């Protein structure tokens, strides 16, 4: 063996250790499902060859891709309870003897049934729908009972046949994959009973039969007893007795109501407005959503012309029980005076109120006036004042008295005032000099700078003189 030419030689390799990770998820959080819903399972891992999936120790899928897989678990025939879902990553784990690499538990509960009308009320001549949810089921049976029971006048009068009761209406509808359902529009004719109708929504459960009847035909089950002569409460008791109240049944039942009433439209009081401002008209109605409400604003006499009519669409109002509508009018083309506001649903139902269009408020007008300001040395200063209409006052003729010519009087007064001013200025400076001398002596006696104090006194004197000159009374010529 040839000896190595290098002594104590070494070599190295860098290895990255990645933590083992397996992921398992379902499509609901929290993982609670109604029986009949599908559980959507997903999983993946960052190492290994493939994945095995078990539900409650039953192997349901093998050789799934570690990069990600999907699996749908139907629960239609399962019992209520908790179910464990788990995965194993092969060949790292053995599903026969090793604990799972990831697991999750889901809970199955009996399905419920919820139904409600599109609105809690409906006007005669309108219509409504019924919608709701029944998870895990594929159909729902809808049954309505008139306020007067089987002998009343219901939505779709059924005479003869299995029901032979004009106060009852029946229909069956499909359920989508999300467990939701909605009926077609149910028309409410103008000759049906008014009042509160019962709406029953039912599903025959996983066994496919109603109660213990061994029949999937709801009408056959409940019509074994004549229903035409039964009251609303009696019919409700019969339906429940033969479906959800039968021993051991898994039928589902939901109950709601709708109130049928004559249509109406109501307009709210409208506040008076100034000419040029908008008029907003609002109101309430039990007419169905999207019904067109005609809104008019008409003059009370020939001096007040009518405004252009508006069409307001009925909309759902979540702040009140009934629906609402709104229209807006411009008033630029209107006149001052009284107006009548009317709303009409097009079916003979109207309501009205009144309002007054007032004189428009006149805005304040700013007028800029220039006048000399003493504080600015005689310069013009602008002031804004609100323009007002002057109030006329009686004119009093002036009394004429003999006097000297105005021009001469003004000239004499001006000369006199000028002479007096010169005298006062001279006296001002004399007093300033006297005070300055006194201040100089006092400052010198105290050992201070007397010249500085004299300068201060003279400056103050000059400033005071200038202020007086600016603020002094003006002669007529100066004005």
Image (cartoon, rainbow, N blue to C red):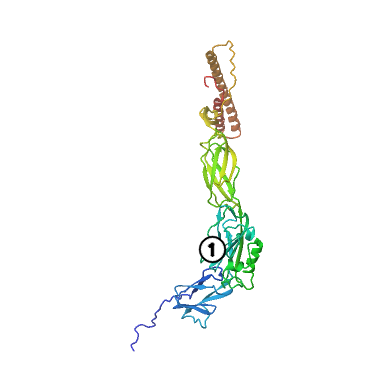
Q: Nearer the viewer, residue 197 or 448?
A: 197
User: Compared with residue 153, is residue 447 higher up or lower down, i.e. above or below?
Assistant: above
From the top left corner, tell me how far across and down residue 256 is, in percent: 61, 60
From the top left corner, tell me how far across and down residue 154 is, in percent: 60, 58
Left or right: 221 as drawn, with respect to 98: right
Is residue 38 at all visible to an observer of this figure? Answer: yes
Q: Farthest front residue?
A: 160
How many marks can you see?
1
Q: Nearer the viewer, residue 45 or 452?
A: 45
Q: Farthest bottom residue?
A: 1
Quadrant, the N terminus = bottom left
Query: Image quarter for residue 399?
Result: top right
Q: Nearer the viewer, residue 115 or 410?
A: 115
From the top left corner, tell me how far across and down residue 381 is, in percent: 52, 30
Is residue 458 at all visible to an observer of this figure? Answer: no
Q: Residues within 10 Å of mark 1 (few under 14, many from 20)?
A: many
* Residue at left offset 65%, top offset 65%: 237
Q: Farthest left residue?
A: 2
SS type, badge 1 = strand
User: Compared with residue 52, is residue 131 higher up or lower down, i.e. above or below?
Assistant: above
Query: Image quarter for residue 210?
Result: bottom right
Dot 1 corresponds to which residue?
Answer: 181
Q: Nearer the viewer, residue 308 or 49?
A: 308
* Residue at left offset 57%, top offset 41%: 341
From the top left corner, tell me how far across and down residue 327 is, in percent: 54, 45
């Amino acid at each position: 063996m040839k000896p190595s030419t290098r002594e104590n030689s070494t070599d190295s390799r860098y290895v990255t250790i990645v933590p083992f990770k397996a992921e398992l998820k379902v499509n609901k959080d929290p993982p609670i499902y109604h029986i009949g819903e599908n559980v959507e399972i997903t999983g993946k891992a960052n190492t290994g060859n493939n994945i095995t999936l078990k539900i409650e120790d039953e192997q349901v899928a093998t050789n799934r891709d570690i990069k990600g897989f999907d699996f749908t678990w139907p629960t239609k025939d399962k019992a209520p309870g908790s179910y464990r879902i788990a995965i194993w990553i092969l060949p790292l784990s053995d599903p026969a003897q090793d604990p799972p690499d990831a697991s999750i538990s889901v809970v199955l509960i009996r399905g419920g049934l919820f139904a409600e009308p599109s609105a809690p009320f409906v006007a005669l001549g309108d219509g409504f729908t019924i919608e709701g949810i029944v998870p895990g089921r594929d159909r729902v049976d809808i049954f309505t009972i008139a306020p007067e029971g089987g002998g009343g006048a219901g939505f779709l009068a059924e005479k003869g046949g299995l029901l032979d009761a004009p106060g009852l209406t029946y229909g069956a509808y499909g359920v989508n994959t999300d467990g939701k359902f909605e009926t077609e529009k149910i028309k409410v004719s103008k000759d049906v009973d008014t009042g509160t109708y019962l709406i029953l929504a039912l599903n025959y459960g996983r066994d496919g039969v109603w109660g213990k009847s061994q029949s999937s035909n709801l009408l056959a089950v409940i019509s074994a007893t004549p229903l035409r002569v039964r009251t609303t409460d009696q019919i409700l008791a019969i339906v429940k007795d033969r479906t959800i109240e039968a021993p051991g049944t898994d039928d589902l039942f939901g109950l709601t109501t709708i109130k049928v009433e004559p249509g109406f439209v109501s307009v709210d009081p409208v506040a008076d407005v100034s000419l040029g401002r908008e008029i907003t008209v609002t109101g309430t109605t039990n007419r169905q959503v999207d019904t067109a409400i005609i809104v008019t604003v008409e003059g009370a006499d020939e001096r007040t012309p009518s405004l252009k009519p508006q069409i307001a669409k009925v909309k759902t109002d979540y702040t009140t029980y009934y629906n609402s509508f709104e229209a807006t009018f411009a008033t630029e083309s209107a006149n001052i005076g009284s107006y009548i506001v009317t709303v009409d649903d097009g079916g003979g139902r109207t309501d009205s109120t009144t309002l007054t269009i007032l004189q428009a408020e006149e805005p304040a007008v700013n007028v800029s006036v220039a006048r000399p300001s003493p504080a600015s040395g005689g310069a013009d200063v602008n002031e804004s004042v609100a323009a007002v209409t002057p109030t006329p006052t009686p004119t009093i003729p002036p009394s004429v008295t003999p006097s000297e010519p105005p021009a001469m009087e003004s000239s004499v007064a001006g000369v006199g005032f000028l002479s007096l001013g010169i005298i006062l200025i001279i006296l001002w400076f004399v007093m300033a000099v006297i005070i300055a001398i006194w201040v100089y002596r006092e400052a010198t006696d105290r050992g201070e700078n007397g010249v500085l104090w004299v300068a201060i006194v003279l400056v103050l004197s000059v400033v005071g003189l200038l202020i007086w000159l600016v603020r002094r009374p003006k002669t007529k010529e100066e004005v």
